[in-house]
Image (cartoon, grey):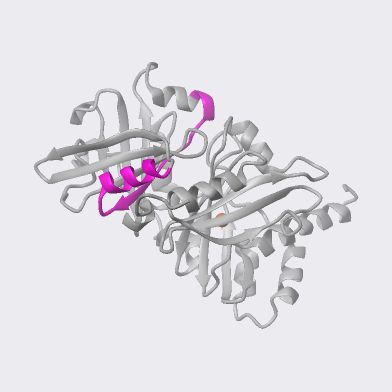
Amino acid sequence: MILPTRAPARYFQGWDYLELWVGNARAFSGWLASAFGFDIVAYAGPETGCAERASYVLEQGAIRFVITAALGPASPIADHVRAHGDGVRDLAIRVSSATAAYDAALARGAVGVIPPWTEEDDSGKVTRATIAIYGDTQHTFVERSAYMGAFLPGFSAEAALLPPSPGGPPVDLRLIDHVVANVYRGALDRWVDFYRGTLGFEEMVHFDDAQISTQYSALMSTVVWDGSRVVLPINEPADGPRKSQIQEYLECYGSPGVQHIALATDDIVASVKALRSRGVRFLTVPDTYYEDARSRLSGIDVPWGALQELGILVDRDQDGYLLQIFTENVSDRPTVFFEIIQREGATGFGAGNFKALFEAIERAQERRGHL
Ligand code: FE2
């Protein structure tokens, strides 16, 4: 079949923002500022002419989050929070033309949520358009070349409207490295087809359940990307002796959705020290992991002592190595979490760690006689 139009990905220019819909935007934003070192730079709410919701814009490096909550029970945001708990609603992508990207997506089979709309204020205009993806999640295309304001029309950077800025050591997170989705069992291929066929992404790598499985958990994963900065691993659960962690997510989130957001740093040791001192907690790593890793990854010049002390994981692929660490869940449900990652050439996602980490946990359990 010859597709009728240029692929939407041809208009993509990287991430614009990730929007989370939460129960209490002011508290969630304040916590991301104090624990993760984000700056809160803009606000929209009743004081700025937006009666139904409160939104805070958080920035760090090139990372931008929008944290939004409902101001009344009739809001679709309240419905979303009731269904999913706090979660990621929108993966917004900057585009050269929102209308062209939206028209191309619909012509190639995407489901439209909001057709192109334009908002204006004294700082210029922004055109956006929104399509549906997995679960209740969506992509908004953001065309903002003609806009000079703080974020979007309707948002204010007035200090009195923003929560006070907490202090703390710099975390220096730089950019969004990848955003991971969990989808239902059997749906992975369909979503890979959607990203490739409809949006014009490419498949970067596939991991099957033989590569990512332990006694605890099995999953399959395919990574799609736009060839530039928008990198989207997609997981589906696979059979294992126990419930896949992906299945647990799907049951607790109530639908497919975003599992984790990976944020890149140039110095993960410094970033994780700062995050830990600000109170961020990470998954703990047994010492057996490092015994294993030092032999599995011998020859890599990394500060093993600091990595072990901080719980940072190491993985290698044909292009180099990467360092990564995963936070505890950041909402009440065991659903969304963050990853901090430093890439030294490696283009992978730490698949070696999944197996090594969980097998290390199993060995530690065995030592205690708990397996
Ligand atoms: Fe990841």
Quadrant hosting residue 23: top left
In the drawing, does residue 157 fall left or right of residue 104?
left
* Residue range corresponding to the magenta coloring: 82-108
In the drawing, does residue 362 fall left or right of residue 21?
right
- Residue 205 vertical position relative to residue 128 in the rendered view, above or below: below
Q: Is residue 18 magenta?
A: no
Front residue of 266 and 118 = 118
In the drawing, does residue 97 fall left or right of residue 110?
left
In the drawing, does residue 71 fall left or right of residue 117?
right
How many callouts does the rendering have? 0
Residue 359's x, y, as percent?
A: 78, 58
Residue that sits furthest to the left in the current view: 122
- Residue 70 vertical position relative to residue 20 in the rendered view, above or below: above
Residue 276's x, y, as percent?
A: 53, 55
Residue that sits furthest to the bottom in the current view: 299
Q: Is residue 337 visible?
A: no
Residue 325's x, y, as percent?
A: 58, 58
Residue that sits furthest to the front in the current view: 1
Front residue of 138 and 333 = 138
Q: Quadrant of ligand 1?
A: bottom right
Q: Residue at x 77, y 55 (%)?
A: 361
Residue that sits furthest to the top in the current view: 74
Front residue of 160 and 295 = 295
Q: Is residue 83 magenta?
A: yes
Q: Is residue 237 visible?
A: yes
Q: Residue at x 57, y 32 (%)?
A: 255
Q: Residue at x 90, y 50 (%)?
A: 369
Residue 72's x, y, as percent?
A: 35, 18
Quadrant hosting residue 183: top right
